[in-house]
Amino acid sequence: MPLHVTVVDDHSAVRLGMKYIIRDWMPEAAVSFAENMPELLRLLSSKFIHIIVLDINIPGGNHFDMIKMIRDIQANVRILVLSAYEELLYALRYIDLGADGYLQKDSREDEIKEALNTVFRGKKYLSDDVKEHLLQRRLNHGILSGDNPLQRLTNRELEVCQLLVQGKGVTEISKALFIHTSTVGTYKGKIYEKLNVINIRELMDKFNFHHIGAGQK
């Protein structure tokens, strides 16, 4: 069976660029596309896929349950996250949740091929920057003075924070995350406290400054 790689991204230029890189990396590979999470789940239900190159910021996605949703359908598929989100904030979270690798969209072509090779062999891929970050944290007993303040948030708090910054109200957030409105209020209070902000404008400024890597989407 030829290698089947699915690129999941809602931008056609990214999908076509990844197809070029994948075919250059492994010419015999079959490449398919999905533009959103429901489309990916339908594809997983109908075809065997070896590797998914996944942008986590897609319609119907952009939450930490995405990895579980994928593995509930195909448990052994390799998942390489390719995102504009800051890797020092997100990489280890997604690895812990079951992704096989994390790479930022501004990575060089040879880095992307190295990541594909690594996850294809069944190993975990992290960039040199993330590895250095982990090493420095270990040497400093788990503390880095220059840490991104968003790292203080739990996964759920980070999800709530994202929605708050998007302008969602408490009721909208409770429906989106299937939690009670009072729970959303509790998370909101913890977010404000951990990030040392007092209103949504301060939250938006701090979040936008630390959240996106490389000035991308």
Image: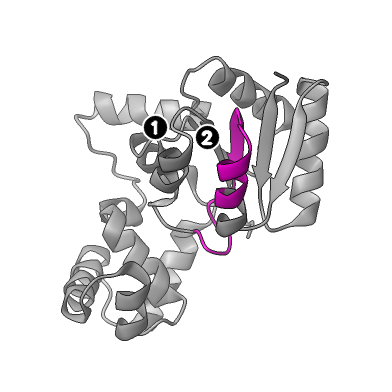
Residue with the mark numbered 2: 79
Please indicate, yes or no, whether residue 6 appears anywhere in the rendered image.
yes
Say if residue 84 shows up in the picture. no
How far across and down, in percent of the image, does residue 94 sit?
40, 41
Expressed as whole percent of the image width and height from the top left, the position of residue 214 reads 61, 50
Mark count: 2
60 vs 25, nearest the viewer: 60
What's the amino acid at mark 1?
His
The N terminus - image quarter = top right
Region in magenta: 41-61
User: How is the protein colored in the picture?
Assistant: one colour
Q: What label does residue 133 carry, if any?
A: 1
Q: Could you say which quadrant of the image residue 135 lies in?
A: top left
| Residue at the spot 34% in from the left edge and 56% down from the top edge | 150
Q: Nearer the viewer, residue 194 or 78?
A: 78
What secondary structure is found at the residue carrying circle 2?
strand
Q: Position of residue 70 (x, y in %)?
A: 47, 43
User: Which of 132/43 is in front?
Assistant: 43
Left or right, 192 with reference to 123: left
> Looking at the rendering, which quadrant does residue 92 occupy?
top left
State whether residue 180 is above or below residue 206.
below
Residue 57 magenta-drawn? yes
Q: Residue at x 63, y 25 (%)?
A: 116
Is residue 22 or residue 144 the one in the foreground?
22
Point out residue 133 in the picture as x, y percentages from the top left corner.
Answer: 39, 32
**Side (left or right) of 141 relative to 7:** left
Mark in front: 2 vs 1: 2
Check contact, mark 2 vs mark 1: CB within 8 A. no
Specify few, some or many for label 2: CA neighbours under 10 Å numbering under 14, 14-19, or 20 or more: many
CA separation, marks 2 and 1? 22 Å
Amino acid under disc 2 = Ile
